[in-house]
Amino acid sequence: MSQVAPGHPLSEGPARARRAMRMGVHWTDRVAHGLLILAGLALALFLLAPMAVILAKSVEDRAGEFVGLANFAQYFATPALLRSIWNSVWVSSLVTVLTLPLAFTFAYALTRSGIRWKTLLRNVALVPILAPSLLAAISFIFWFGNQGVLKPLMGEGQIYGAPGIVGSMVFATFPHALMILVTALSLTDARLYEAADSLGTSAARKFFTITVPGAKYGLISAAMVVFTYAISDFGIPKVIGGNFNMLATDIFKLVIGQQDFAKGAVVAIILLVPVAVTYGVDAYVQKRQSALLSARSVPYVPRRSRGFDWAMAVFCWTLALLMLAVLGMAIYASFVKLWPYNFSFSLDHYRLGLIDAGIFGAYLNSLHLAAWCATLGAAFIFATAYLLEKTRGLDAWRPFVRLMAVLPMGVPGMVLGLGYIFFFVPEGNPLHFIYGTMAILVLITVVHYYSSSHLTAVTALKQIDNEFEAVSASLRVPFWRTFFRVTVPVCLPAMLDISRYLFVNAMTTVSAVVFLYSPRTMLASVAIVNLDEAGDIGPAAAMASLIVVTSALVCGLYYFAQAWLDKRTQAWRH
Amino acid sequence: MNRSFVTTAAATLALAALATGAWAQKTELLVYTALETDQLKAYTESFQKTNPNIDLRFVRDSTGVITAKVLAEKANPQADVILGVSATSVAIFEAEGMLAPYSPVGFAALNPMYSDSKRPPYWVGQDVYAAVVCYNTVEGAKKGIPKPESWADLTKPVYKGQVTMPNPASSGTGFLDVSGWLQSMGEAGGWKYMDQLDANIAQYTHSGSKPCRQAGAGEFVVGISFDFRGNDVKQKGAPVELVFPKEGLGWDIEASAIMKNTKKMDAAKKLMDWVATKEANEAYSKNFAIVSHPAVKPALAHIPADLEKRLVKNDFAWAAKNRDAILAEWQKRYAAKTEK
């Protein structure tokens, strides 16, 4: 020791240096802990608290007195409301049964056939995601309504009610199922098929013993997602439901139409039941899923087969054209002067119906909302996921934050929105000031779409070796430097994905925000609901078209940003 | 300072700034209204010509929704002014003690029939709106469905599944229909009529405009709506004829009032002053055939000049007192109706 010159770090002795290092780690760790606690508290505040208040409200009367289960008793004594439960369940089940085989076949064609233009087909099939669900319903009215182009196909029947709801919902849920099933079918081990071939197994047998079991979890997951979407969606039954009531429209009528919040809370809780069941089933199934791919797996390369490829191509293009027909009809109708009597081209619905009527501001508000969600929201979600996955300590708190991050998937937007009213409207709440502002819309939208974004972030983070953090820690580099120097650049593609997802959903969501907008913060999607309520279906179609076009353009921008970034920062992947 | 602190702080600040929003130098009135979106702009412009320093923020919805909202907020009222909400509903707010009486400048010149009878009045009427049936001539001819002349006609089997009307719980137009039938046919007769009509109804809509717009688009042949929307749909070129059923038309008044709890009483009074001006009445007269100011004579292309004579006798006190009971009975009878 004495040989070391004074002033050299080592002169203070290795023991001290080690202690200093440990203290340094502790200090930065504490920052991480503090941030993680804050993030968890924020999620609790904006998710758990509003949900808890719904439970409390459901056992109070209109004056706020505790009445036990009287609201529930009253609810179950009202046949009209009871019927909605049945309507919701059977419609959602039917939507699931119809969507699943269609999406499965489509996904099968994309992954297991030799058809051309797969990327194009896939993108077309994902188009419904860019539109508010209301658009599908509006289009179905123009196609199959009493003055619809294809009304003769309806015979004596009416599109209003269950048929229109089911059709629109199949359109709206299709891409969600498709994405899950494509992933499920991509994960396959070609060796299984090779073995089957060498044993002379028939195609049908291969399908049922290899393909379906392999995609089993994807199928279950897709079924759950479709069912949950269908039972929670509000826009579609509102626009095309006629007198056909569902739980989501009942909540709206009770809360907005009659301002009967207690009864609304009861329906919200009833709506939570089927969603919670599907959510539980999905969670259970996902846990049981074991790795399909091992290091020795061989990727499946579809073989060309004329007949099969032809059949698949016909199927896919038919569906893709149907999707474009639904989308295109809303856009076309928004330019028709007076459906069905004057089909001349006109901008009236945009000029008179939106701008002169003073509703165009709603579109700008939606852009604001989407921009906030895509930036602040995405940053918060990603940072929280990072703190959860890559920092150490605080082991008791982590599972709670993790639960908060995946819970929003099981909460329908209207239920969350109702919870926000209950929680933020009372003036006693110190956060009351955010009620009626854009901030509350940003918050609820981010929370509503939290889970998918979180899972995307976690998947990306898991691809990065934890060694980076370990090495940084041993080099006394604070975690945030690692975060900004390593994690963020590596995960940029995933961050862009999250950002885009939040942007598009903020543009299209209705259910989460329909209770919370104020005259200042009216949104485009809500404006569609109001226009349709007044029978102003032309401007409603115009507003829906604006949303789709915006979402599509923004997705295009993200695509180019992604490509550019790939070139600049993702060279290590190649 | 480390960077993630800075980011977090910036994010928090941004959120806070977002939350507080713009701070207005102008006075801003929160106005609850059931006026149609396409009327609000013209009215606001007319008001701001003389009151450029008062901004109007509208919470707009159907009459039933606004009524429910005002009543639900009774403990902590949000609105400063009620503008253009049915007199039946405004009379309920008055009975609940939520309104401040005020006699606008120029009130004396208005037709007293269309405002509150107390002095000073708790509410001031702007105009009268009345039931109108929109009948689509093209679809009628195609389907062999004749033009109805009376309320009774609409119960004929030929109209089955071809008639839409607004839900009285959400729509002021729906309520004036129901209230008008109950008053002109007697309670038992009115409910019996609605039972028969219900058999022909394709949809009960949320708003009073939708039935006429649907009829205009040929979606259904007949829409029970109100005069402003009927005139508007026909004006825009839809092949509809407006029917004024010969038994008489249900009607209501679009009324305005000041909420007692407003912290902006001066601005609220300014808005009420505008409501009573001749200029405002001229703005109403572009939409309605009967307005409060006797010197303003509206001339609407498709509404007969003698509309006033076709109205049924309407007892607002009775309607206000029985509104809840009527709606409950209506819900019980027809809301449970499922899809056809």
Image: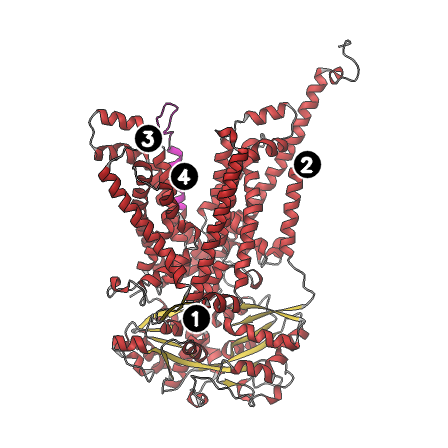
What's the amino acid at mark 4?
A: Ala
Q: Which residue of the protein is positioned furthest toward the front in this rendering?
A: A345
**Vertically, is B242 above or below B259?**
below
* Mark 1 or 3: the one toward you: 3
Host chain of mark 2: B
Q: Residues within 10 Å of mark 3 (few under 14, many from 20)?
A: some
- The residue range painted magenta reads A276-300
**Separation (CA) of disc 2 from disc 1:** 56 Å
Do the residues bearing badges 2 and 1 touch, measured as CB atoms within 8 Å?
no
**Residue carrying label 2:** B2
Do the residues bearing badges 1 and 4 touch, measured as CB atoms within 8 Å?
no
* Mark 4 or 3: the one toward you: 3
**Vertically, is B243 above or below A376?**
below
**Vertically, is B234 above or below A114?**
below
Q: Which numbered dot is residue A300?
A: 3
Residue A344: x and y in percent read 39, 68
Q: What SS does tag 4 mark?
A: helix
**Separation (CA) of disc 4 from disc 2:** 38 Å
**Residue carrying label 4:** A283
Q: What SS does tag 2 mark?
A: loop
Q: Residues within 10 Å of mark 1 (few under 14, many from 20)?
A: many
Host chain of mark 3: A
Is A360 or A482 nearer to us in this picture? A360
What's the amino acid at mark 1?
A: Ser
Do the residues bearing badges 1 and 3 touch, measured as CB atoms within 8 Å?
no
